[in-house]
Amino acid sequence: MTVADVREAFPLAPENGRIPHSTEPPTGAETRPWILRFARVPDSSQATVLPPAVYDEQLQMSVGLYDGPLPYMQTHTPTIPDGNVKNPPPLDEGAKD
Amino acid sequence: MTAVLVIAARDDWPTDRVVKALTDGGAEVFRMDTAEFPQDLTLAGRIDARRGWSGGLASPLRAVDLASVTAVYYRAPNAFAFPPTMSEPERRFAAAQARSGLGGIITALDCRWVSHPAAMSRAEYKPLQLATARACGLTIPATLITNSPDAVRAFAGEMRGAIICKPVASPVLIEDDQLKTVYTRRIQAADMGDLRGIDTTAHLFQAWVDKAHEVRLTVVGDRLLAAEVHAGSDTAHTDWRADYASLTYQVTEVPKDVAQGVRRYMDSLELRFAAMDFIVGPDGPWTFLEANPCGQWDWIEHATGLPITQAIADELRGVSS
């Protein structure tokens, strides 16, 4: 028997995405974590629209679909969620299982 | 030929900057995401009495000998990806084998790390961050982690009501088909009137610390790259992440005693990178809040000109600053 969780030694994003999608609504006050009373949908107006890009195997970085600077030169986005549940933001906490 | 192994998601654009800085500096880079294994990434690692782990990691375009890897940059890679034709038990089995096989070899590499993933995992726990910071001589706020409403009331009484609550772990969730986040909440008297739900999980409460401004200190190896974060709204004054548009930044220096504590912290947790948050009080003292071993840094470099990308590349190449 082992008690060690080897995932901690080599952390990867979870298989179903960094933030699993759910359509379940919040439950009641008795069963919902108290701090979630203060959860809110972020101000998406502050989110930056990312330019379309593809990964270039040769350069080992993303390149734009059109002429212009490389994508990384166009964006300096902090963690501002845009509210899109299909495109959640990177987590400050990094990868976690 | 030596090589730097970069392990990150393909769409992690700040990592693009690091790759560019490395290649501009003459380094050979092998970039991979763990999601490429096993379908687009081949592993053939060997070890024997004569030498440590060697052999190849190969993608369709390039290959690297594990024995030639002198440094690894590790930043939030994705899960392994298996053919959809696998059954669920087969996929779970294969994922465990991949983690112990590929992940096991990579984490066994004796080289420079920014940072080693086991150290990063451990350092993500806020309770450990606070305990380590305290042991290293940094000032921390009084903190309570509890699932007891009575303990919350007692703590609020001791702190005379000026307390905040924030998540102990990730602040983001998707429920009801909506992405939501939880920022730091300065607790109001009305909040204390109904503590139902405290007992459902661990909650973190902290003494409110008066602030002139905050500091984001990005630590890379021995380099301390500090920026003052000035809040331009009440929302940002409580949690600057809640209102980026109101923020202004200014490069600053780290007081000597804080710098010493930070270096002890990094050594203690065996980190070579951290994004640290401090409150700077009206009279100047620095209070440690948290240290993120995989924090965002791209926007603060852009806003301040602090050379974080170059510092990461230098650390990976073993170049002294």
Image (cartoon, coloured by chain):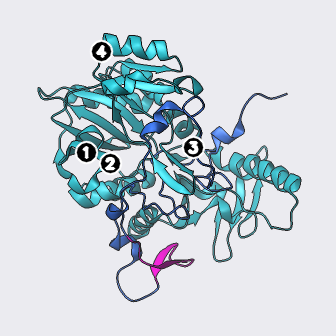
The chain holding disc 4 is B
Q: Position of residue A17 (x, y in %)?
A: 62, 56
Task: Check if mark 4's residue and mark 3's residue have beta carbons within 8 Å.
Answer: no
Q: Which residue is mark 2?
A: B242
Please name the residue that numbered disc 3 is placed on.
A26
* Disc 1 to disc 2: CB gap under 8 Å: yes
- The answer to whether tags 4 and 3 share a subunit is no
**Residue type of the residue flagged with mark 1:** Ala
Q: Nearer the viewer, mark 4 or mark 3?
A: 3
Residue B275 as seen in the image, left or right of residue A25: left
Q: Position of residue B146 (x, y in %)?
A: 50, 20
Of the two numbered discs 3 and 1 in the rendering, the one whose residue sits closer to the viewer: 3
| Helix, strand or loop for disc 4 | loop
Q: CA distance from mark 1 to mark 4?
A: 22 Å
Tell me if residue A55 is in the magenta stretch.
yes
Mark sitting earlier along the chain (1/2): 1
The quarter of the displayed image where residue B263 is located: top left
Residue hosting label 1: B236
Query: Is B134 placed above or below A86 here?
Result: above
Q: Earlier in the sequence, mark 2 or mark 4?
A: 4
Residue B230 visible? The answer is no
Q: Chain of mark 3?
A: A
The chain drawn in blue is A
| Mark identifier at residue B159 | 4
Nearest-to-viewer mark from 3 and 2:
3
Along the viewing direction, whichever of A70 and B240 lies nearer the viewer: B240
Marks 2/4 same chain: yes
User: Would you call the spot at circle 2 few (<14 residues within 10 Å), some (14-19), or many (20 or more)?
Assistant: many
Segment tinted magenta in the rendering? A49-64
Chain identifier, cyan in the render = B
Label 2 amino acid?
Ala
